[in-house]
Image (tube, rainbow, N blue to C red):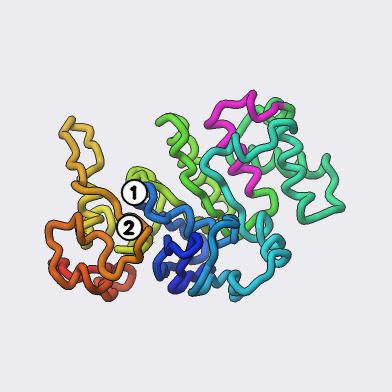
Amino acid sequence: MLDINNLSVYYGKTRVVRNLSLKVNDGEIVCIVGESGCGKSTALKSVLMLDKNASVKSGSIIFNGKDITKLNSAQVRQIRGLEIAMIFQNAFLSMDPTKTIGHLFYETVKAHNKKAKKEECLKKAEDIMKKLRLWETERIFTSYPFELSGGMCQRTAIAAAMMNTPQLILADEPTSALDVTAQAQVIRLLKQVKENYNTSMLIVTHNMGVVANLADKAAVMYGGSIMEFGSTDDIINNPAHPYTKALIKAVPEMNGKIPEAIEGLPPEFNDDISGCPFAPRCSMAKDICYKKFPEKIVLSENHTVYCNCCSL
């Protein structure tokens, strides 16, 4: 469904996403995981050209056979919210505070169907919310965003994203602004979306718990590049790249064991990186790691890693 090939995205002359490639198949949930500032959100927003300050300088974003990078703004607007829906990190800030939630559902449909009737839209919204186990629909429809909790706003935004039955959902850190209980509710809701609609998803997160509980496949991103890609089981239980291993070791455990922090700091994007972006923080780094970006190593049919010094 979605095939991103060698995508490079720039802010001015600064390259933030470096030759990124990944695929999302029908009915599949893929998570991009990595530290804050590694380029995850920029890559995600580039799929729908949502960041006016970012420019795609090379590569392609193929969605259902169409290269989105070759479309004009009007053509991209026809895809946004209809074929591809977006869920933002803070749903409350993405909503109009002067309009009710019911109006949000109506506007979502009206943006692509000028003849849409509000009563019919609300009936469809009610059906979607009940299917996703969101009750008290009448109260929610008549509420303003500030009258709902952060978790309910996020869950409502997910339901609204399904109004046009998109084939793909993009989600930018959908759980990061929520407490643990609300995070679990959002994860359950996203699972229900997949079960009820077979909707594909590309989700950005820095939370390995979200990956473990939600994703079919995961892409580990660092310094603007994908370092490792594979099934969730491969990434969690058989990580190959030193950065992936370090990320997993940094996750707190229930037994009270203190997690291991990753020494050093993420790379600056001011200067283009010629070698592996993780090299300065990697205990296994060799001279070649600073000079040459690693070639792709295929570990299995669905598991690849980019590393010059992995012990494979």
Residue depicted at 66% across the width and 57% down the height: 80
202 w.r.t. 287: above or below: above
Examine the rendering and report whether any part of residue 220 can be seen: no
The picture places residue 194, in percent across and down from the top left corner, at: 52, 52
Q: Residue 35 shows which numbered tag?
A: 1
The picture places residue 267, in percent across and down from the top left corner, at: 30, 55
The picture places residue 207, in percent across and down from the top left corner, at: 36, 44
In which image quadrant can residue 68 be found? Answer: bottom right
Tell me the kind of residue under disc 1: Glu
Ranked by sequence position, the earlier of labels 1 and 2 is 1
Residue 144 on the magenta segment = yes
Q: Are marks 1 and 2 in contact (CB under 8 Å)?
A: yes
Q: Is residue 160 left or right of residue 240?
A: right
Q: Which residues are magenta?
A: 143-161
Q: Which residue is mark 2?
A: 222
Tell me the kind of residue under disc 2: Tyr
136 w.r.t. 112: above or below: above
Looking at the rendered image, the quarter that the N terminus falls into is bottom right
Q: Secondary structure at mark 1?
A: loop
| Magenta-colored segment: predominant secondary structure | helix
Residue depicted at 24% across the width and 37% down the height: 252
Q: Secondary structure at mark 2?
A: strand
Residue depicted at 51% across the width and 50% down the height: 171
